[in-house]
Image (cartoon, rainbow, N blue to C red):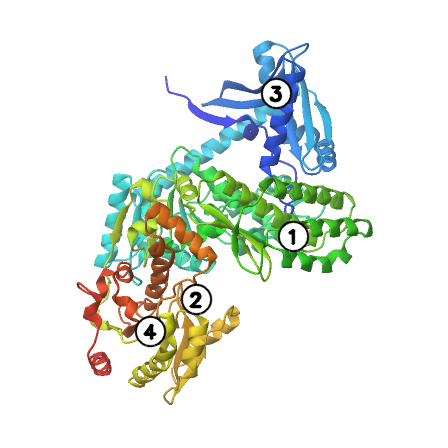
Amino acid sequence: MTKKKRIQIAVSKFSLPSPRRGSIDLHSGYGWSTERGNEIHQKLQLKRKNENPSYTSEVYISRQFHWEEYLFEIAGRMDGVYAEPLPIIEEIKTCFNIKNLLKTLNEIGQDHPYILQLRTYGYFYWLENNTIPTLNLHLVASHNNEVINYEVQLDINSFEKWLSCRASELVAEARFRERLINLRQKTGENFKFPYQSARFEQTQLIKKIEEAFLENRPIMAQAPTGLGKTIGSLYPSLKEALSRGQQLVYLTCKNSQHQIVEDAILRLHDQGEDFRSITLAAKNKICLKKEPLCNSDYCEYANDHYTKMAYHKVLEKLNNKRKLTAQEIQKVSKLYYVCPYQVQLELIDQVEVVIGDYNYFFSSNDFFGQQLVYICKHPEKPNLIIDEAHNLPARSREYYSCSLSSYTLKKMFEEVIFLPHKLRSEFETLLNLAILTIEKYGLGNYAHRIVLDLNEFMNVENRIRDFVARFLDSGAQVRLEDVVSRLCINWSEFTNSLELAYNSQNEFFTSYHPNPETIKITCCDASKILLERYNNFKHVVAISATLKPFHYYSQLCGLHKKKPRTEEFNYPFPKANRKIILIPQVSSKYKERAKNYPRIAEAIYKIISLKNGNYIAFFPSFIFLDNVLKYCSIPPHFKILKQKPNMEPEEVNYFFSELRNTIKSHIIFAVQGGIFSEGVDYPGDMIIGAFVVGVPLPSLDIEHEGIREYYQKNFSKGYEYTYIYPAMTKAIQAAGRVIRSENDQGIILLMDDRFMQEDFINPMPKDWFNKHPQELISSSILNDIRGFWSASR
Ligand code: SF4
């Protein structure tokens, strides 16, 4: 007898209309607190228990049945069951706007998931006890605790009709998934590297990743630019995932890096590999409305989304596309009047490669994260690649840090005139309360550590939520990014971070900053949270050109507990194509800067005079840059391009078009860690030299000092972890702009005596020198560079 295949599913996931129908209805933009929902649940359950001893909360119920070749195992927890005098099953649902929910329940009736869930409990109870219980949906408004009891009827015949439709639907989905897994495995069997031959270092990278998979350990790979690390990590990771019938999630730190991954995927497609990929876009980028307010009254795409999806078979229509982008999904969504964001979510489960930004998986409350977690719940887990992983420690800290400024709130008074007349003064009172709550923590005109009272912030949040409910009930027209929505979002994000800080050990601290008056929650270390996320994946590959020292990155990326393999790969091009010179006669130390500005300017002048072409001088800050620029003169035929803070994309593009202009030579004055120094390519002769002037050590302020204390206490490396290693990563990234392919030639000038100090040497790539950077010091800099240029092509 063949063993039955299983479909294990929670009652809440099982209880959906079949065929799927209905609208999207989220008051997105007004925040939502699951904690608040849980709190209401627990309070009510306790009250019920005190009122009636026969009441039991969280009652587990399950059922097994056979359907075609599958065995269904459905289980759930009923919120509460009264045994006496008559059996009643009660399901508690908290919602933001109880009247809207009631309207939806009345309109959709028996097809609403809440009703189907309660009926499923009732049906299972009937099968077990031969009695149909009373079914009560207890609705609670989260902002004011208003309640409505909604009685649900259970007609066994009509329920079984729905049940048979739903079971058949799930069987069809399971068969689809089985076919998908088989197809993936077949693709995985013959999966080929897309180039005739790989470079030695690239072959090594692939080999080491495969070895790490066999050892079941994550791998952290430092691979220099030009090695081909995108395809070198994508190929073995996807092949392994496919061989298990699974998916690969490829995360980048910037949307602009998605293109590089898409290009690598295109290479695999070109050689005939049959798999699909999706590049995720943020909700506000893919939304077809001006603002993503996802409810059927406001958005025609939300209205009847599920009905239209099923009727037009939208997912099937997108099935023949191997590369799914936001534009493609928007095009199809417009045609059938469905929500492109939701379509994206529904496709995640069906493709082989999911490309997205870090925050889709690592941030605290992103919706994609929840969806990605869902795909990770399959018994066989997907693989994960974290590209440019050196960005993860700082990025993840940002996700869990938060600030509130009274200046921003004061600006909101200007928008009060857009609110309904009767709500204006109440909103002003609320703003004043919020401002007062922030400003009372200021003890003077200086930054200082503070202790925030979580209850106080929760109370203000509750008052804001009350107001939001009245605002929505008033029928007022919701404007784009309206002021009520912004206040609600800002405050609840802060409260969420504060809750996290309260429940953490010592990873967070809070501070007050004057001018403008701001309170901040700083996350020093998000590694524990990251570690939990990795558990959703089978294998994790973290790659970057700068992952040293490995102990620093593995600790702060949360991988250290999983004992990662760490590998550093060699520079893949002829060393003769690159000349690195260290100039320790220059110092960027604060006290010595002023006398060094003219020396740096002079050195730049002399060096670029030796050969026409494009150069970049990378400075530790804009102030430093401006000071050197004051002393700078340039040879004829050269033009200076100066980076400004927050440049528009058109301005950046102008720089690139200038660099492509071969008639003139250029020197860009830029900063380390900026748009011209990381995640950007200068192919061919676009850049022939880089000056890395100084090390961009973070400023010595209350925030960095707070982080330093934490690192000192926890890792005994406070100064290195806070200041030196992040700064050196930026310096090395900047130096890495010069040589991007085997035909590139160029010079790299490291200008600072700090590059000779041990802690600054640790993060350097091993191919920069044999034993010590002292080897890079030249006794005749200009002659050496002249010699290099005359020996080159
Ligand atoms: S189109 Fe925009 S507003 Fe409409 S449901 Fe989708 S994301 Fe929400």
Left or right, residue 594 beside residue 742: right
Residue at which label 3 appears: 80
Q: Disc 1 to disc 4, how far (Cα)? A: 43 Å
Q: Disc 3 to disc 4, how far (Cα)? A: 68 Å
| Residue furthest to the right | 422
**Mark 3 vs 2, N-terminal side:** 3
Residue at which label 1 appears: 486
**Above or below — where is 240 with respect to 157?**
below
**Are discs 3 and 2 less than 8 Å apart at CB?**
no
Mark 3, secondary structure of its residue:
strand
Which residue is at 30% across, 75% downward? Answer: 586
Q: Disc 4 to disc 2, how far (Cα)? A: 14 Å
**Mark 1 vs 2, N-terminal side:** 1
Q: Disc 3 to disc 1, how far (Cα)? A: 37 Å
Q: Residues within 10 Å of mark 2 (few under 14, many from 20)?
A: some
Observer-nearest of 441 and 562: 441
**Mark 1 vs 4, N-terminal side:** 1
